[in-house]
Image (spheres, rainbow, N blue to C red):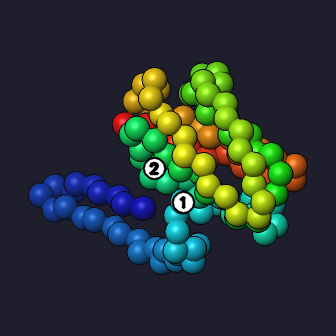
């Protein structure tokens, strides 16, 4: 906390030092763990033109839904996975801004923020 006061012509300042520790040791800030053993990456992010959704530990049909800030679904795509897979999503037609990508399959439901330039 930072407090500053003025007493006559003398300024006083009180500072409190806080020790901040890193909470996550994950070297990849785009990696998100969904269900146990499932990892989801969205890159590049921010993106323009296209972005790639990479999944590890997922099998079966995966639905990718892009949702705008008003909660409207603006794009839905499906991909088939057998353990590990990647899917390139075209972003043409999307205005610059913040979106959410929902990655859903049996046993996995992850939401990732996507910034479109």
- The disc at residue 9 is none
Q: Secondary structure at mark 2?
A: loop
Q: Which residue is mark 1?
A: 30
Cα distance between the residues tagged 1 and 2: 8 Å
Q: Quarter of the image for the N terminus: give it.
A: bottom left
Q: Which residue is located at x 54 percent, y 46 percent? A: 88
How many badges with numbers are in the image? 2
Horizontal and vertical percent position of residue 55:
67, 58
Most distant residue in the right direction: 106
Q: Which residue is mark 2?
A: 45
From the viewer's perspective, tell me whether residue 61 is left or right of residue 79. right
Residue 35 seen anywhere in this rendered image of the structure: yes
Q: Quarter of the image for the C terminus: give it.
A: top left
From the viewer's perspective, tell me whether residue 99 is left or right of residue 2. right
Do the numbered discs 1 and 2 sit on residues whose CB atoms are within 8 Å? Answer: yes
Question: Taking 36 as reference, is 68 above or below it?
Answer: above
Question: Taking 68 as reference, is 108 above or below it?
Answer: below
């Amino acid at each position: 906390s930072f407090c500053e006061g003025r007493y006559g012509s003398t300024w006083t300042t009180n500072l409190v030092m806080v020790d901040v520790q890193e909470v996550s040791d994950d070297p990849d800030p785009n990696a998100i763990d969904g269900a146990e053993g499932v990892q989801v990456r969205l890159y590049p992010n921010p993106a323009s033109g296209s972005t790639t959704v990479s999944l590890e530990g997922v099998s079966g049909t995966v639905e990718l839904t892009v949702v705008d800030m008003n909660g409207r679904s603006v794009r839905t795509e499906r991909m088939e996975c057998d353990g590990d897979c990647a899917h390139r999503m075209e972003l043409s037609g999307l205005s610059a801004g913040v979106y959410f990508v929902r990655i859903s399959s049996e046993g996995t439901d992850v939401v990732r923020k996507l910034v479109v330039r």
